[in-house]
RNA sequence: CGGGGAGUAGCGCAGUCCGGUAGCGCAUUCGCUUUGGGAGCGAAGGGUCGCAGGUUCAAAUCCUGUCUCCCCGACCA
């Protein structure tokens, strides 16, 4: 039995690519750095999208859609913003091609008067629209989200983790007061944390980015940071407090209750298809993808084992009512009666694709009044007696909940075991090689941060605010309502009010 | 942009040094046998060898140019 997936221990990067390929999540496309998201991958994204969309609506947001193209001049209106994105923009310069002996070339006569930028993010085009939407405090807040694709001309790419074009959502809100905008920023951060943990079973640390890691144009960038199996950190979502920067750049003012003209306060927040990369590197193993039940396109695969049509028909008399009852109970089921593949092939395929539960039913089982039940996350198999389909549905539904819960616990434990306190720079340099989150004191200066990055490739992932790293660490960081301990910077020895989280990151 | 690797059947590759009928494995199609962990045998289909020039009786192979992808760094969700 040839395993087509490179073991994690041999080459984690290759393992990742193999899982993406074997689970048929995505392919490389002919264009460098962009990918084809295949039905298996897109089905996971759809489930993520649906749940997030629900959460956005629950918090009062509406969806809208803004254009793909942004006039070049818009990008330059916010100084920090243009500086951050200028180097990675796709630019549309011409509007047509013309045929030349057997091929086509860009028609030089079609040059655009003002070049168009393919959106790397939509703050500018949206704030241009908001100017005409907002006159009075009564027009606020504006709470809008859009589902879109964006393009960032990246140097190096990896499927899902960094592609030149990616799918995401971007929320853009406008508020009358600073306080309200800050509340919105942290509220959406909390939405992301909840989604990551409850739906993806991916534990995260919430926190604030340092100035050098901040979104271009933001006053503060909040983030959720996850820890992957190989010890590298992944920024999984960001929520920005934009202050009045974009309102000033696009001249968006409103008349307050007292009649004054004031600039509007803004936030933006987003998560992308990168989350799928995070999902893979949180749960999966050498057999392939592991998907938490809430996101699994197929939650239960039923594999009949049979010789010939007659035996298949006999097994289907048990398998079909079971599949129907499971579907009726709201579970996503695939009755895999394909006859061109042997059971072993199907087992391997469902495992590679991360189907959480598998039920195998053969003549031997029917004779004994049982079925074989296999859990994808633990790879455990057990035989269980055949029950009434409705009872089956109930117990399998419970088991799926259990798996969802166990995956989060397992991932949280891993994050906790790979998070540790370091107090000296020597120790830091040794420990960073082992991966994980390092909790260290920092003097708050960009110079120290830059030097540590240069010497160790570690960045400050965030100044932590929330999350669960376990008793001692929680206490040290003041997570969950406590007060963080102060100390001295590992590099400069200067005073530090609290530890920050360092890691090497994707 | 610097360093490395690679473009030959849907996928993975050999052949290139030393020019001479375009091959192998997997996949696909058909038939028979199979079916409790990636089935076996037999047959069949599928290629302008990344592209453009050049040398030659003859180019996947030699020469020149060019494009693209992947991996490692600098940049980043």
Image (cartoon, coloured by chain):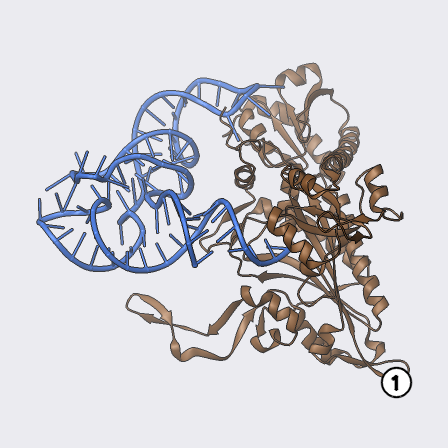
Chain colours: A brown, B blue
Question: What is the crowding at mark 1: few (fewer than 14 residues within 10 Å), some, or many (at least 20)?
Answer: few
**Among the 4 quarters of the image, the one containing residue B28:** top left
Quarter of the image holding residue A80?
bottom right
Q: Residue at x 50, y 23 (%)?
A: A1
Kindly identify which residue carries mark 1.
A259
The residue tagged with tag 1: helix, strand or loop?
Answer: loop
Q: Is residue B21 left or right of residue A375?
A: left
Residue A312 placement (x, y as % from top left):
58, 25
Above or below: residue A462 compared with residue A255: above
Is residue A484 visible to us here? Answer: yes
Residue A310 in percent (x, y) is at 56, 22
Q: Is residue A486 left or right of residue B28?
A: right
Image point (69%, 14%), residue name: A368
Position of A113 compared to A237: left or right?
Answer: left
Viewer-nearest residue: A256 or A379: A256
Q: Is A90 in front, or is A360?
A: A90
Would residue A13 be found to the left or right of residue A135 on screen? Answer: left
């Amino acid at each position: 039995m040839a395993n087509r997936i490179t073991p994690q221990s041999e080459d984690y990067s290759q393992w990742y690519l193999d899982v993406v390929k074997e689970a048929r999540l995505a392919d490389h496309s002919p264009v460098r750095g962009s990918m084809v998201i295949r039905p298996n991958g897109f089905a996971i994204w759809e489930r993520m999208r649906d749940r997030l969309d629900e959460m956005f609506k629950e918090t009062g947001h509406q969806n809208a859609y803004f254009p793909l193209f942004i006039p070049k001049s818009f990008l330059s209106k916010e100084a920090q913003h243009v500086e951050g994105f200028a180097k990675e923009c796709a630019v549309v310069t011409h509007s047509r091609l013309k045929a030349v002996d057997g091929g086509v070339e860009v028609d030089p006569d079609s040059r655009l008067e003002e070049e168009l930028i393919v959106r790397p993010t939509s703050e500018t085009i949206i704030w241009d629209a908001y100017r005409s939407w907002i006159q009075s405090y009564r027009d606020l807040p504006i709470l809008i989200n859009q589902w879109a694709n964006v393009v960032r001309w990246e140097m190096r790419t990896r499927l899902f983790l960094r592609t030149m074009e990616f799918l995401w959502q971007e929320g853009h809100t406008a508020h009358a007061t600073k306080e309200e905008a800050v509340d919105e920023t942290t509220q959406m951060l909390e939405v992301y944390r909840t989604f990551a943990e409850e739906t993806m079973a991916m534990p995260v640390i919430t926190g604030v980015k340092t100035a050098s890691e901040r979104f271009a144009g933001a006053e503060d960038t909040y983030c959720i940071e996850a820890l992957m199996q190989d010890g590298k950190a992944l920024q999984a979502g960001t929520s920005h407090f934009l202050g009045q920067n974009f309102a000033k750049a696009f001249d968006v003012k409103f008349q307050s209750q007292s009649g004054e003209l004031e600039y509007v306060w803004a936030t933006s927040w987003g998560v992308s298809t990168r989350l799928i990369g995070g999902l893979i590197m949180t749960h999966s193993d050498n057999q392939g993808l592991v998907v938490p039940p809430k996101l699994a396109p197929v939650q239960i695969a039923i594999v009949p084992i049979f010789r010939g049509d007659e035996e298949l028909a006999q097994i289907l008399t048990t398998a079909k009512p079971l599949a129907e009852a499971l579907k009726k109970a709201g579970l996503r089921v695939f009755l895999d009666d394909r006859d061109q593949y042997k059971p072993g092939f199907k087992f391997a395929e469902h495992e590679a694709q991360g189907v959480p539960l598998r039920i195998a039913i053969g003549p031997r089982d029917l004779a004994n009044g049982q079925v074989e039940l296999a859990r994808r996350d633990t790879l455990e198999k057990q035989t269980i007696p055949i029950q009434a389909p409705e009872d089956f549905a109930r117990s399998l539904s419970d088991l799926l909940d259990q798996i969802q819960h166990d995956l989060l616990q397992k991932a949280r434990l891993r994050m906790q075991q790979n998070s540790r306190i370091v107090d000296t720079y020597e120790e830091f340099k040794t420990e960073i090689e082992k991966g994980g989150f390092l909790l260290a004191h920092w003097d708050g200066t960009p110079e120290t941060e830059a030097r540590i990055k240069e010497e160790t490739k570690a960045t400050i992932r965030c100044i932590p605010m929330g999350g669960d790293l376990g008793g001692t660490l929680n206490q040290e960081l003041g997570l969950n309502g406590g007060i963080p301990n102060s100390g001295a910077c590992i590099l400069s020895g200067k005073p530090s009010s609290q530890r920050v989280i360092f890691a090497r990151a994707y």
